[in-house]
Image (tube, rainbow, N blue to C red):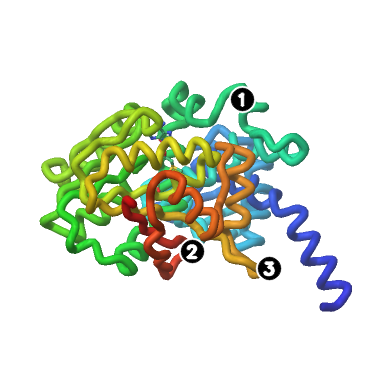
Amino acid sequence: MSETSVHQQIDRMITGYWISQAIYAAAKFGIADCLKDGPKSIDQLAAETSASPDALHRLLRALASVGIFSEGEPRHFSLTPLAEVLQSDVHGSKRALALMSGDEQFRAWAEIEYSIRTGKKAFDKVYGKPIFDYLGENPDKARIFDAAMVGIHGRESDFILDAYDFSDIGVVADIGGGNSSQISGVLQRHAAMQGILFDLPHVIESAAERIEALGLSDRCKLIGGDFFDAVPEGADAYMMRHIIHDWNDEQCLTILRNCHRAMSANSKLLVIESVIPPGNEPFGGKLLDLVMMLIPGGKERTEDEYRTLFDNAGFELVRVIPTASEVSIIQGRKR
Ligand SMILES: C[S@@+](CC[C@H](N)C(=O)[O-])C[C@H]1O[C@@H](n2cnc3c(N)ncnc32)[C@H](O)[C@@H]1O
């Protein structure tokens, strides 16, 4: 690599947050929603969003330079494919993800030195409490978090369904299922299957609307609770997507043991996570692991680390099934 390209590459990495925070600002001001019916002038956009026209112009010009929005007629902007997914109501919307990343997560990242020095959660240092307590007390932020989870993980559902045969499962439980992007995909693909969506009570309340809108209310029981206390009994498979990575080993053992207690001898355990591969290859889970360290205090794990966790909770790790996305299904059974 030439010296110039080394400098360009590291400069882009060092200043990566210039772009991510500019996207956050566009998401916060709802610019993509304002442009859904066609191009608008900066003056119109600034009036609709209560922004400074000059500052908004500089924001959108900068974003247009990386393919997000496009300036056609001078000081008139329109959507591009990258801007379209920042609209609130499109399938796979990334707006909530941009809002969550640019707000609480960004503030936590600013304290990365603290986490690296102490091994403790930067989020708790900034907000004075764990993330899920904070979300419980801030319903607007909780709604953004739930929508951000669909934005970041929602597309994994089809890959999981393609990689794993759910057809012999009568009742599937999604533990910490959030606003249902995983279980609704499974139930839609398997018309005879019944489901249990389990999450904190305030999350279940908002998920009810989505389950109803998808016409799944008669096939999906909604149960609010705390997986550190207990999880519902009676399912043939217990899925947990991006749950175990949120917690430290001791907390994971409590959750897994609660699943173990609720499961019958033949129930399946399906943990869905990014399994960290060895070596230096690019792998998103290695960066997501830093988010886990800074924010909830969990970690992404290797296959061996999952095997040890399973073993200590009374499960045998049966197999790790890769999917066409970065996540794998780590299947366990009761020993
Ligand atoms: C990273 S999100 C994953 C959501 C969903 N499984 C997905 O893949 O999109 C973690 C989920 O765990 C839930 N959660 C956190 N603490 C919980 C607890 N003590 N009991 C039950 N659910 C909890 C959160 O509300 C959130 O929905």
Three-letter amino acid code at the position of disc 3: Asn
- Name the residue nearer the viewer: 140 or 316: 316
Q: Which quadrant would residue 292 be assigned to in this image?
A: top right
Residue 168 lies, in percent from the top left, at: 17, 61
Q: Circle 1 — which element?
A: helix
Quarter of the image that includes the N terminus: bottom right
Q: Is residue 192 left or right of residue 203?
A: left
Rendered image: mark on residue 144: none
Q: Is residue 315 left or right of residue 126?
A: left
- Helix, strand or loop at mark 3: loop
- Visible in this render: residue 35? no
Image x and y of residue 225, in percent = 32, 28
Marks 3, 1: nearer the viewer: 3
**Residue linked to disc 2:** 326
Q: Which residue is under mark 1?
A: 127
Badge nearest the viewer, 2 or 1: 2
**SS class of the residue under badge 2?**
loop
Question: At label 1, which amino acid type do we have?
Answer: Tyr
Percent of width and height locating residue 116: 74, 41
* Residue pointed to by mark 3: 280
Q: In this orientation, does residue 273 appear?
A: yes
Cβ–Cβ below 8 Å for labels 2 and 1? no
Q: CA distance from mark 2 to mark 1?
A: 31 Å
**Labels 3 and 2 touching (C-beta < 8 A):** no
Q: Does label 3 point to a residue whose CB lies under 8 Å from ligand 1?
A: no
Q: Residue at x 27, y 39 (%)?
A: 262
- The residue closer to the viewer here, 260 or 297, is 260
CA distance separating discs 3 and 2:
15 Å
